[in-house]
Amino acid sequence: HITNIGAHEALDSRGNPTLEVEVELSDGASGVALVPSGASTGNREACERRDGNAERFRGRGVLDAARSVNTELRGLLLGMRADRQAELDQAMISLDGTENKRRIGANAILGVSLAAARAAASSLGVPLWRYLGGSQACVMPVPMINVLNGGAHADNPLDFQEFMILPVGAASFAEAVRMGAEVFHSLKEVLKRAGHAVNVGDEGGFAPDLRTAVEALDFLMDSIERAGFRPGQDIALGLDPAASEFHSPAGYLYAGQDRHLSSEEQVDYLAELVRAYPIVSIEDGMAEDDPAGWQMLTARLGDRCQLVGDDVFCTNPALFQSGVEQGIGNAILVKINQIGTLTETQEVLRIAARHGYRAVISHRSGETEDTSISDLAVAGNGGFIKTGSMSRSDRTAKYNRLLRIEREIGAGAIYAGPLSFPRVIR
Ligand code: PGA
Ligand code: ZN
């Protein structure tokens, strides 16, 4: 049972404070977790509690959230069993009492939820992926590697937030990482030769001064070929326009190109990109407050493209269930801090499985060295992980953890790439 819980301020990858939580058990086992933080957040995400005291960390301190962990949550959970995840999480949700966890803070609750799972796994002497996934867990996810950054994650005029490469043709996760890293370096060379800066954005991808998605996609195609791979067969492409960020009642504003698109035109534009490039996944192609646009996009491209809902679902079981009923997308982005407990995250994964939606386990743009999402991706047999580019330790920590997990699973490990995209021409 739980004998102590403690929370402190630590730093995330953007130099902002975040919570580190430790849970200790009576048998001496313990677990530590660090909480991530987004920049292009969905409106209906669970609430990240910040102090708002301008004297510290520009108002972003998390001392109040830490205090809630050290007092209220500690008092609530002392003596409870760490391996009763659903009970722990439900107790915290009830004590918070709000719809979006704003009273205690989703960051506080998530830190405890994850640290408890880590402590329970450690107490049993098993890795987290096996504790969460059981003996069935053996599928290594396809990494969706965000090598070009724009939108809210970079200072360039590129409207789309993420341009990803997916090594679908790899034979193993380790090979997928090698292929991804080779293309990352090839892209660096190609951009440099074209006179672009090759400093990296929040998620470790390049953030060159490009204006249009087509320019970015052409650079990707070139870099894939120069690295010796076949675009589409070995390495497919993925987009996260993060369209909520540039959508308003006036439509989708392409500031980099100085034009506005209606929902119909936005769907046409994305369909044209899918026709012209080997794009197999589009996340948030439409805005969170444009369900009709989402339905249009799903009807148009749903049979040939993974359409991933991030802002529109917010990893929220109720929002997701209602989105499924409305025919929105065919996949969900799963971010543990959008909902704030492991139990609700697992509920979302069950809803996805029940309705044939794919699940992409995801980091946030503000990350830490915590690698829980790598374990979660394998535990859910989900088949996809989005955790940034092939640089910055906050991103490579997740890949390195997955490489270790692949070795732990050994001969039984199955790489999801070829299974997931049979439509890609090989
Ligand atoms: P965020 O970005 O963590 O800033 O929300 C990631 C994403 O939009 O998928
Ligand atoms: Zn997104």
Image (tube, rainbow, N blue to C red):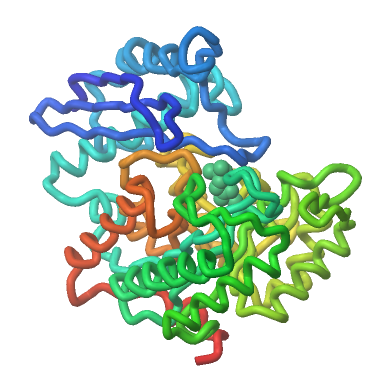
- Front in this rendered view, residue 223 or 327: 223
Q: Residue at x 29, y 60 (%)?
A: 402
Q: Residue at x 25, y 49 (%)?
A: 128
Q: Quadrant of residue 194?
A: bottom right
Q: Position of residue 241 (x, y in %)?
A: 67, 56
Furthest residue toward bottom: 426
Tell me the quadrant of the picture where the N terminus can be found.
Answer: top left
Residue 148 as seen in the image, left or right of residue 2: right
Res 133 visible: yes
Residue 323 appearing in the image: no
Closest to the observer: 228 or 388?
228
Residue at the image point whose x is 21% and y is 25% from the top: 2
Residue 146: horizontal and vertical position, in percent? 50, 59
Identified at 30% across, 50% down, the residue is 397
Of residues 354 and 110, the one nearer the viewer is 110
Q: Quadrant of residue 248?
A: top right
Label tally: 0
Q: In the rendered view, tell whether residue 143 sits above or below residue 131.
A: below
Question: Which quarter of the picture shows residue 408?
Answer: bottom left
Q: Is residue 285 above or below residue 57?
A: below
Q: Residue furthest left?
A: 27
Pinpoint residue 51: horizontal percent, then vertical percent.
51, 13
> Is 260 placed left or right of 332 in the picture?
right
Q: Residue 180, position in %: x, y? A: 40, 69
* Residue 300 in the image: above or below residue 163: below
